[in-house]
Each structure stands twice: as C-alpha cells, then as structure tokens.
Amino acid sequence: MSRRAVFAAIASSLVVAFFVGAGFAFYDWRLNPGGIFRGPDGTNWRFMYETTISWLAPTFLSLLPVSFGIAWLIGRFRRRGPQARPEKEQ
C-alpha cells in the first residue's frame, strides 16, 4: 500500500471520528443532562472537550481498520486494472 493510501486512510478516519465526536458533544450540550454542559455561567467547555474526546478515540480506532481495508482494496483494483481480467476463449 502506498504512503498516499495510508495517509488517506488515517486522515479520513480522523475526520469522520472528529465529526462524530463533535456531533455527540453538541447533542449532549443541547439536551444538557443534569445541567453539566451549560448553566448560568455559560458552557462548561471541559465537559464538551471530554465528551468529544471520549467519542473521537474509540470511533477513530474502530474506523481505522475499515479505512485501511478500503484503501488496500482500491489500491489492489487500481494495480490490476481492467486489462488484467482474463478474456473468455471461444
């Protein structure tokens, strides 16, 4: 697998994991269970950070093998190309 494919797999996993983590942090901020995310003093950014990281790390680690698998399959298909397919003899 090329360096470009490895970088793309890591970067895409990180981007998706960040948006998942930020999405769930925003969702928790909107619901504000127990008043721990925001109150009269404003937003509790420490809880927002901890929630984002608690979703980002496991999501990233879960997506990474999937991204590497997809990158490997794409690289393998591109190397073979359509000319590598055997033609049927008549």
Image: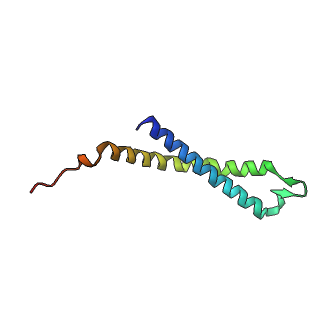
Q: Residue furthest left?
A: 90
**10 or 35, which is in the foreground?**
10
Q: Residue furthest top?
A: 3
Position of the N terminus, as image quadrant, is: top left
Position of the C terminus, as image quadrant, is: bottom left
Residue drawn at point x = 19 percent, y = 50 percent: 86
- Indicate left or right for 62 with 34 as reference: left
By what rule are the colours in the image chosen?
rainbow
Residue drawn at point x = 47 percent, y = 39 percent: 6
Q: Residue 13's x, y, as percent?
A: 55, 47
Residue drawn at point x = 83 percent, y = 57 percent: 38
- Indicate left or right for 38 with 86 as reference: right
Q: Residue 9's x, y, as percent?
A: 49, 44
Q: Residue 31's x, y, as percent?
A: 76, 64
**2 or 48, which is in the foreground?**
2
Q: Residue 27's x, y, as percent?
A: 71, 61
Q: Residue furthest right?
A: 40
The count of marks equals 0
- Indicate left or right for 9 with 57 as reference: left
